[in-house]
Amino acid sequence: MSQMDGHTGRDGTQAEMLTGAEIVLRALTDQGVDTIFGYPGGAVLPIYDAIHAQDRVRHILVRHEQGAGHMAEGYARSTGKCGVALATSGPGATNMVTPIADALMDSIPMVVITGQVPTHLIGSDAFQEADTVGITRACTKHNYLVRDVNDLARIIHEAFYIATSGRPGPVVIDIPKNVQFARGPYVGPGAIEHRTYRPRTVPVDHRIEEAVALMAKAERPIIYSGGGVINSGPKASEALRELARVTGFPVTSTLMGLGAFPASSPQWLGMLGMHGSFEANNAMHDCDVMICVGARFDDRVTGRLDAFSPGSKKIHIDIDPSSINKNVRADVPIVADCGEALSALVAAWGARGRQKGPDLSAWREQIEQWRARKCFAYPGSEAIIKPQYAIERLYALTRDRDVYITTEVGQHQMWAAQFFHFDQPNRWMTSGGLGTMGYGLPAAVGVQAAHPSALVIDIAGDASVQMTMQEISTAIQHDLPIKIFILNNEWMGMVRQWQQLLHGERYSHSYSDSLPDFVKLAEAYGAHGIRCDSPAGLDDAILEMINTPRPVIFDCRVEKAENCFPMIPSGAAHNEMILGAITGNEIGEAGKVLV
Amino acid sequence: MTKAPKSPRAQKSTARSGVREDPASAYDMTDAKEQIEHRTLACIVDNEPGVLARVVGLFSARGYNIESLTVAEIDRNAHQSRITIVTSGTNHILEQIEQQLLRLVPVARVIDVTQSGGIERELALVKVAGQGERRVEALRISEIFRARVIDTTNESFIFEVTGASMKIDQFVELMRPLGLVEVSRTGVLSIQRGKEKGG
């Protein structure tokens, strides 16, 4: 137990003495946290007492700690704020590992508070003891075990600083139960200056000049933007739009970056990568200057590395120096916050005055030729709902709404990325790096908690949605009217597709056997269930979903054997896309199909 | 012995969030023909619980090699430890190791000891058992290597020898036919030359 008497604070005044649990709540309040997602248990009971005693921080009770983590991610991604989740020791903490790893891969700012057995029991294999800091060391940006209540307030504020600054990520604070009971001084957030952690945010001038010099001579330029632009905040998206406007360069983006650049712009090429557009991938392959901003040359984006954009000079902007030169060598490395770097590029481009750059019209014409291939075209059907058609209709019927989309992982995720279009950042929540099935439903709950009156839709698959299905109960309890739009093809569609294309059509364990009746399941939970299996009835059914002011599970029965195209097979180059059945053997010399 | 640095300015360290200033335009970074080099890195870290586990975990998680590792607190007031790691990999991997180390929150800086011509030393304890001519020969060689005898019985010596790792390797090889029993080594320690504080 620590001092029970007064304690001198940083500014010399008497610091207020609170219990550890009270310090947690006070620090959350001072950090501007209005909502946390959690699940109680033995080792966090003092914190739950402190939650009970206040009304400034709303607690959303989940059904499984993984749900709490993904909700915090959805909350964070849709608001730009730090998400907060709370769990007990042992199984509470281990259940939280998946969302923590997910947040690390997708650079989502998140603080996870876990209870721990009392300090004197640590290491004794006590009931519900797990080495939480050991287990989460590899999947957090940083983590803490708080052994002394005197450090608690500082650590919480530091955790928020680390989670939200530089390249954002998850931070775990493990608090033993006796530390939650002990009294200690509360210190406010103040100005945090970490001893060793000091991310650089402002670009070096000469790098900006080098970048602009390359851009000014570019004949076939492209901007390749990623999730970092969204993480950087709305100003970065504005700066990206401004850069595209003043230069006229075409823009593509990663899965995580959708929405930073408006899909309605004629300069927009669509998403790039494995299931990206033909025009985006070919433009990446043939460009002479690439401006990569807030993206990390992931293998789903680059395809075969030694054939990746062979003729281009690459400008790489990233706040994390280890992302630069990791997979692809940068000619002009710019370590900076995306927004700062983009604004600096816009300013430097403007400072060139009236100098005329090369004529981009030939490049634009080439891009239009690629675009004319209509790579996302699919054969329509009057009899059965095509999954692409379902997303197209969902998009069309929600255009005038304040809409947020989350997804699970698989074919439905790629179709959502291809057929749902975004004009604003923070509207698209998906698990990109880790590829976590079961992310979308709880993420939607988190988004809805942050935006109560918005239309929040989880575009789901029948397999993924069952991984975190129980969180519909959370949505019901807290009056969060999320819409779960299941593209139900009775398969783990992406697994089935790979088995068809790469494993000799041996469909090993990818059939979703014994599926629940999703309509009855919805009703059992107290939600509204809708089923639709005909293209003719789809619009009305979608409108019914939108107009239902409660949580809805929509069982959209779609074509079972549909594949997601276009596709760059693993190990192939950008100009080796398979365009799918609709173009048959037209792929020509670009179609060295590696199946 | 390690070579003297070309100039004091050749000291190469990467400050937190700094990228190497040598962006060569080579895209075939997966080229297997790239040479494997050995490299000694020193990390100055905040001496907090778990910091060694973070560093070691990073190496195992990303598949990097650790050939030797030493760690101890070097400044009690500043709460700092120095971790010297001998690793190997292609130049590209070695650069990544440095950058990945800098991502760890408690890592203050990383010094490339090899490229900055720093000094590297290792200490070894070498137990040799034998009698007669072999015993005399072992003692004679130990004098050449300026090893100290720190324990002796009628049939054995324990030598303490310090120097660059290669010198210790050579000493151990010479002792092998003379009755080498076992060896204990500290791993490599490092420090920067000149009057400046390293890194």
Image: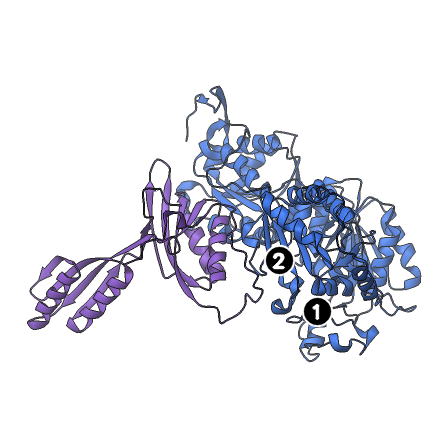
Which numbered marker is on residue A568?
Answer: 1
Answer left or right for B32 relative to B4. Answer: right
Residue A120 locus on image (x, y percent): 39, 41
- The picture's colour for chain B is purple
The residue located at (45%, 21%) in the rendering is A6
Q: What amino acid is at disc 1?
A: Ile
Residue A88 sits above or below residue A376 on the image? above
The residue where tag 2 is placed is: A434
Q: Nearer the viewer, residue A372 or A312?
A: A312
Mark 2 vs mark 1: in front: 1
Q: How many marks?
A: 2
Identify the residue at the far bottom of this view. A504
Q: What amino acid is at disc 2?
A: Leu
Determine which quarter of the picture holds residue A307: bottom right
Whether residue A452 is visible, yes or no, is yes
Identify the residue at the far top of this view. A13
Determine which quarter of the picture holds residue B197: top left
Residue A75 sits above or below residue A530 on the image? above
